[in-house]
């Protein structure tokens, strides 16, 4: 899977293929329409790249979250089985203190160990889900000129 990439960053100039002016003389000789077209094209490209980056990160993190959710589900099922077999064991011991109740208790202890192991693995996997870190970092690098500053706006 290819990840969208960003340009070299502010201060490095525009990509030569973009057709953007580089010097003050080139900017002065460009029409306002050409400059606006370039700005809108650049903003459109930036937004598309950010959306693609977010989609890729969501897919990647979704897989991790899905795995952790499955393991938590397994731990929940294991916990259910513990409750079931402990209940059966207690019932058997109260009804008839024989070997069948002890066998049910042994099965319940085994399910408790399975549930504990699944829970431990689920907790470990859930800690690796980190959110949309790359997208967040990338969006924070958008120049301040594009961000609204309502406190500095006068009418």
Image (spheres, helix red, strand yellow):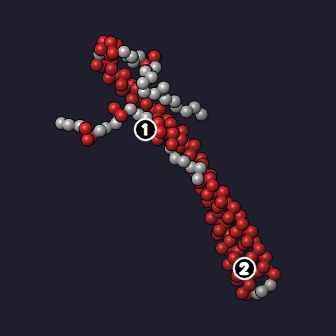
Q: Is residue 53 visible?
A: yes
Vertically, is 153 above or below 11?
below
Q: Is residue 141 left or right of residue 115?
A: left
Residue name at image x 63 percent, y 55 percent: 124
Location of the N terminus (image quadrant): top right
Q: Position of residue 155 (x, y in %)?
A: 18, 36
Which residue is situated farthest in the front direction here?
11
Residue name at image x 43 percent, y 35 percent: 141
Residue 89, which numbered label? 2
Disc 1 from disc 2: Cα separation: 59 Å
Q: How many marks?
A: 2
Q: Is residue 23 left or right of residue 88?
A: left
Which residue is situated farthest in the right direction here?
99
Q: Is residue 16 left or right of residue 81?
A: left
Badge 1 crowding class, 10 Å Cα cut-off, few under 14, some 14 to 19, many 20 or more, is: few
Residue name at image x 36 percent, y 26 percent: 40
| Of the pair 12 and 54, the residue shown nearer to us | 12
Mark in the foreground, 1 or 2: 1
Q: Earlier in the sequence, mark 1 or mark 2?
A: 2
Q: Position of residue 131 (x, y in %)?
A: 52, 47
The residue where tag 1 is placed is 140
Q: Position of residue 110 (x, y in %)?
A: 74, 68
Q: Is residue 51 visible?
A: no
Give the SS element for disc 1. helix
Give the SS element for disc 2. helix
Vertically, is 69 above or below 49?
below
Residue name at image x 32 percent, y 23 percent: 36
Residue 81, which numbered label? none
Q: Is residue 43 left or right of residue 5?
A: left
């Amino acid at each position: 899977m290819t990840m969208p990439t960003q340009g070299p960053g502010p201060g490095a100039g525009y990509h030569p293929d973009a057709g953007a002016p580089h010097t003050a003389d080139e900017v002065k000789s460009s029409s306002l329409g050409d400059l606006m077209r370039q700005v809108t094209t650049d903003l459109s490209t930036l937004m598309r790249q950010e959306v693609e980056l977010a989609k890729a990160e969501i897919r990647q993190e979704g897989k991790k979250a899905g795995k952790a959710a499955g393991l938590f589900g397994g731990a929940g099922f294991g916990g259910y089985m513990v409750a079931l077999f402990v209940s059966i064991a207690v019932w058997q011991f109260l009804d008839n203190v024989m070997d069948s109740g002890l066998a049910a208790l042994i099965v319940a202890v085994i399910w408790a160990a399975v549930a504990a192991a699944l829970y431990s693995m689920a907790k470990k996997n859930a800690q690796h889900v980190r959110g949309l870190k790359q997208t967040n970092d990338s969006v924070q690098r958008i120049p301040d000129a594009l961000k609204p500053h309502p406190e500095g706006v006068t009418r």
